[in-house]
Image (spheres, rainbow, N blue to C red):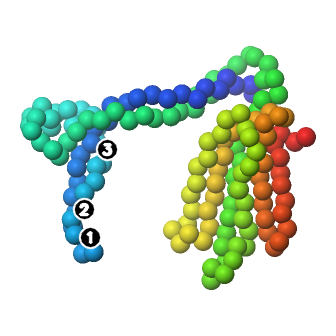
Amino acid sequence: GIVVEFADMGVVKKVGKKLWTRKTMHFGEVHGWSNIPLQEAERALRENPETNEYKIVEEKRRYVRLMPSEEDPSGRLLIYRTARTKTTLKGFGRQYWAHFEGNPLWKKEIQGGYRSGRAHTTGCLAVVDQDHPLILVHQESGEVETTRWPKE
């Protein structure tokens, strides 16, 4: 791999919102806000300042920036790993199960899975070094296995 400069950044961004309404048989009328282009919300509010169907809000967003660097990485590594879990077809137990432990310098986890909820995956982007590892704990058939990054 290459050495990169890592920055965890946050910004505040203006976002246009539009109110939506729908009727359901169980809950009756339900409401929510959907994102729309900022220019569309500004135009709607200019044309009708009294409307409650549009609004402009500020949202906080987080980003990770990676830039090539010539610096010595000092033993720090940026890694991405996945942990997978699956439940048996009839739901009587786990076929296998995994999660992350450890104390990385920085980490961000994302999760996704099947609609049935029987299986899911957790992805983890982390900055690690020897003193701040990421550890994958995997359990299957009563056996527990751990994998450490970076390796000792």
Q: Quadrant of residue 152?
A: top right
Q: Residue at x 70, y 25 (%)?
A: 4
Q: CA distance from mark 1 to mark 2?
A: 7 Å
Residue 106 shows in this picture: yes
Q: Is residue 36 above or below residue 120?
A: above
**Label for residue 27?**
1
**Label for residue 30?**
2
Residue 89 shows in this picture: no
Q: CA distance from mark 1 to mark 3?
A: 23 Å
Q: How crowded is the residue under tag 1: few (<14 C-alpha within 10 Å), some, or many (20+)?
A: few
Q: Quadrant of residue 12?
A: top left
Q: Position of residue 103 (x, y in %)?
A: 74, 40
Q: Position of residue 133 (x, y in %)?
A: 79, 40
Nearer the observer: mark 1 or 3; the answer is 1
Q: CA distance from mark 2 to mark 3?
A: 17 Å
> Which amino acid type is shown beneath numbered disc 2?
Val
Q: How crowded is the residue under tag 3: few (<14 C-alpha within 10 Å), some, or many (20+)?
A: few
Q: Quadrant of residue 67?
A: top right
Callouts 1 and 2 close, C-beta under 8 Å: yes
Q: Is residue 143 above or below residue 54?
A: below
Nearer the observer: mark 2 or 3; the answer is 2
41 relative position to 99: left or right: left
> Which amino acid type is shown beneath numbered disc 1?
Phe
38 relative position to 140: left or right: left
Q: What residue sits right under mark 3 in the picture?
A: 35
Callouts 1 and 3 close, C-beta under 8 Å: no
Q: Position of residue 47 (x, y in %)?
A: 9, 34
Q: Mark 1 or mark 3, which has the lower sequence index?
A: 1
> Which amino acid type is shown beneath numbered disc 3?
Asn
> What secondary structure is found at the residue carrying circle 2?
strand
> What secondary structure is found at the residue carrying circle 1?
loop
